[in-house]
Amino acid sequence: MDMTHQEKSNAIREKMKEAGVDAYIIPSSDPHMSEYVPDRYKCIQFASGFSGSAGTLVITPDFAGLWADFRYFEQATQQLAGSGYELVRLKVQHTPEYIAWLGEKLAEESVVAFDYQLMSMVLGEEIKTALATHHINIRHLDLMAEIWQSRPALPTAPAVLLPEKDCGQTFNSKLSALRVALTEHQANVHVISSLDDLAWLFNIRGNDVSYNPVVLCYALITINEVTLYLNHQKLSPADVNLLAERGVKLKEYHEINADIQQLENGTILLDGKRTSYQFLTQLSSTVQVIRETNPVVGFKAIKNAVEIAHIRAAMVSDGVALTRFFKWLEENLGKIRITEWSASQKIKAFRERGKNFAGISFASIAGYGPHAALPHYAPDEINHLELLPQGLFLLDSGGHYFYGTTDITRTVPLGETTDEEKRDYTLVLSALIFGTAAKFPKGTRGYQLDGICRQQLWQQGINYGHGTGHGVGYYLNVHEGPQNIGPSNAAVAIDPGMLTSIEPGIYRPGKHGVRIENLVLTVTGETTFFGEFLQFETVTLAYIDTSMIQKEWLLPEQINWLNAYNQLVYDRLKQELTDEEASWLAEKCKAI
């Protein structure tokens, strides 16, 4: 019989007591610091029942808590009920506030343990340094291995090498660029753990992680050799031969640990955010560590001409699916029972019918009424609302295609709407257009563009708690760095070739939520006496609803932008639609 979550926390405490541990930390990551993790590493869900993608459990003899940010407050409150765990609400998103809490609560000479392979280098070192000031020690301990009796095995799904003609760059040319970067950093060894960076570098894709087309692997790269660590059975004999022809030595996935321990007298480049703390602790003291962002992160963010062409094609397929979905929704609402869950399944079905579909890029956020006020709400088969012919429906969804990745949000009225809903919708649309239409000097960072998007909302005393935009991969992770558009001062410019989302929102808890999101490609604008300027090209192709717009909240040039965008959507999609579908879309895209 399966243990309850209370019994699991008690079992963890027993193991802590046996090991002489005063607090145990369970993060939400895997050994690759992934956002979405294989079932084997869903340790928080196993221990507490919380299924969100971000959070941290901390267990002491008399307390068990989940530290999570505002995106998960309602979900965590529901899922933790009766589990023995309490929700600790983060004041600042992505901040490890539990570290200070441990420093205050634990006595000197206490021991805090966690599985080193599930903590990033940066975070592991921060925990060690901060707790040392309180004379608290840390220790490696994997308690999940001891109490998780039916723990899932590592995934065995096949992997494949993409045709290099569809990648726009060969593995060898990517490797050459990486080695140049290593030389510039005066490093002769580099270990890569982050799965999307490995997928891009080796032109390899897999199905080991939900929503991300990646394969579990590592790479150890020197100036003369390349070793790829993965389960050999994942690859076809033809792909194994291709890798050998490219000079790649294959080793089994787990052998990376022994090889890292055997490194001596070298200079190794490690990405502190994307490398596990365990690797750092395994290195010989004779190895010099250079802490720098993995150069592949920057390479991958700049899409080449081949990638951009495929992305454009993916947007057409996605736009057709969304057109068919919203037409179906409008024509069937009130005639058949439609719920948030069935709607999320329906948009998936429409995408599956389209060209070159390869899977959804994240769990669809389908929120009706008050659920739309939860930025990361996702319905399931049990917990969902029925869609009624009134109020607002928010759909944030995306797909993977051969080859391209999409992420789009649309908010639509299902019937009668209030003046407040219409105003909020128009203000969010205004914020989207402000950001999308921005022209900015080369070197501009995301936080500067974030302020441009939010300005009209701020003037009305309105704000939203999430970032305005994130990078998106090329048939890869829907959330990709290094760029972002948000309030934090990330030292990354928004450069030509970057694919980024713009997704402002307004959320009124218990009432409604509005978000509109497009993906934009950074392109060269004009060069003046004052320097080179950049701008955005919107690549997402799905109509923006105009029926709720209060035109007094939009500038004339914003209305012109909206009319031109909707016309572009119609022109790009009409050839892929039936006459009836094209006629319906033409009505939705009429100028206002």
Image (cartoon, grey):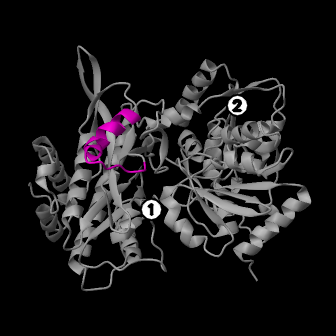
Residue 38 higher or lower than 250, as above or below: below
Residue 336 higher or lower than 550, as above or below: below
Q: Distance between the residues labelled 2 and 1?
A: 36 Å
Q: Where is residue 85 in the image (x, y as percent from the top left)?
A: 67, 67
Location of mark 1 (residue): 360
Q: Which of marks 2 and 1 is in front?
A: 1
Q: Name which residue lies at 64% across and 45% down.
A: 241
Question: Upstream in the sequence, badge 2 or badge 1?
Answer: 2
On the picture, is 175 further left or further right than 491? right
Q: Is residue 410 visible?
A: yes
In the figure, residue 157 lies in which quadrant?
A: bottom right
Q: Can residue 347 be seen in this view?
A: no
In the figure, residue 203 lies in which quadrant?
A: top right
> In this orientation, which residue lies closer to the viewer: 185 or 243?
185
- The amino acid type of the residue labelled 2 equals Glu
In the rendered structure, does residue 89 fall within the stretch colored magenta?
no
- The amino acid type of the residue labelled 1 equals Ile
Q: Position of residue 566 (x, y in %)?
A: 17, 53
Residue 77 image label = none
As helix, strand or loop, the secondary structure at mark 1 comes to strand
> In this orientation, which residue lies closer to the viewer: 175 or 186?
186
Q: What stretch is highlighted in magenta?
A: 447-466
Q: Name which residue lies at 45% across and 67% down.
A: 378
In the figure, residue 180 lies in which quadrant?
A: top right
As helix, strand or loop, the secondary structure at mark 2 comes to loop
Location of mark 2 (residue): 225
Q: Position of residue 575 (x, y in %)?
A: 18, 59
User: Which quarter of the rendering shows the C terminus?
Assistant: bottom left
Q: Name which residue lies at 73% across and 62% down.
A: 63
